[in-house]
Amino acid sequence: MANDIKPRIRLPSQIKAGDVIEVKTLVTHDMESGHRRDASGVLQPRRILNKMTCAYNGRPVFEATLEPAVSANPYVSFFLKATESGTLDFTWTEDDGTVYRAKQAIKVG
Amino acid sequence: MAVPVVRSDRRRLVLGAAALSALALLPKAALATPQAAAELLRKLVKGAPQQGRVTLQASEIAENGNSVPLTVTVESPMTEKDHVIAIHVVSGGNPNPGVFSIRLGPANGKAEVSLRIRLAETDKLIAVAEMADGSVWIGSREIAVTVGGCGG
């Protein structure tokens, strides 16, 4: 499960230069908090995505540090001032250091 | 043949109930305290926070503590000179006081983030915002939780 994460990113369908747009992201991930026990009472070790970043045409624009208090399948939405077309690069970092990446084209015009 | 089926169902039910009560007897994870949350805040931000400018939006009653939608908004023009650098959210009722921290800048245009979070029990959530000019603002909100979200 943890190795099968699927990032989903949603932008408004029409973006004009200067618009402040909402960027919605959702990743499938258990976000195992380290406090949960399975059916047989065994404490499950912590395994979460602890960091998320977004860069807009190579420029860092957003960073989130996530704790176990963030829900499974973490949904994060934030705002961005759309200035030019290009790419949004997202990363999610897992506790063991694995980095998951996603790219999203942004069309401004 | 209907009778044995009913019987086995009932046995499964009883077993299930026994397993559930055994789970309930397991010690609950120790929860953080409002003091721990305040301490973490002191570590995260420098300077005394002023009340205002930070709004937490969430429903007053969360039926499922596993997934509580939360939106944090900070009043700021988000210009080069005057913008939010960071938003930190902490809780006093979860096993760990930290919830999340966000770093922002003028490129965001609007200081607002939405996440879904876990709450173990009815809890006062606190958000602080650090501004580019060094000032720190604080806001809070009480959220009642019907079913806790930490699987204790």
Image (cartoon, coloured by chain):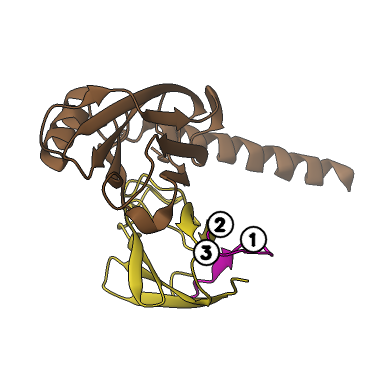
Chain colours: A yellow, B brown
Mark 3 vs mark 1: which is more N-terminal? 1
- Mark 1 to mark 2 CA distance (whole Å): 10 Å
- Disc 1 marks a residue whose amino acid type is Pro
Q: Chain of mark 3?
A: A
Residue A13 magenta-drawn?
yes
Which residue is nearer to you in this view: B141 or A29? B141
Judge by depth and name the residue closer to the eye, B28 or A48: A48
Report if the CB atoms under discs 1 and 2 are less than 8 Å apart.
yes
Location of residue A79 in the rendering, given as x and y in whole percent from the top left corner? 48, 53
Residue at disc 1, secondary structure: loop
Q: Quadrant of residue B83?
A: top left
Q: Which residue is mark 2?
A: A19
Q: Magenta includes A85?
A: no
- At x 45%, y 48%, the residue is A71
Residue linked to disc 3: A28
Magenta range: A4-20
First reached walking from the N terminus: tag 3 or tag 2: 2
Secondary-structure class at tag 3 = loop
- Find residue A56 and report its horizontal and vertical position in percent: 42, 71
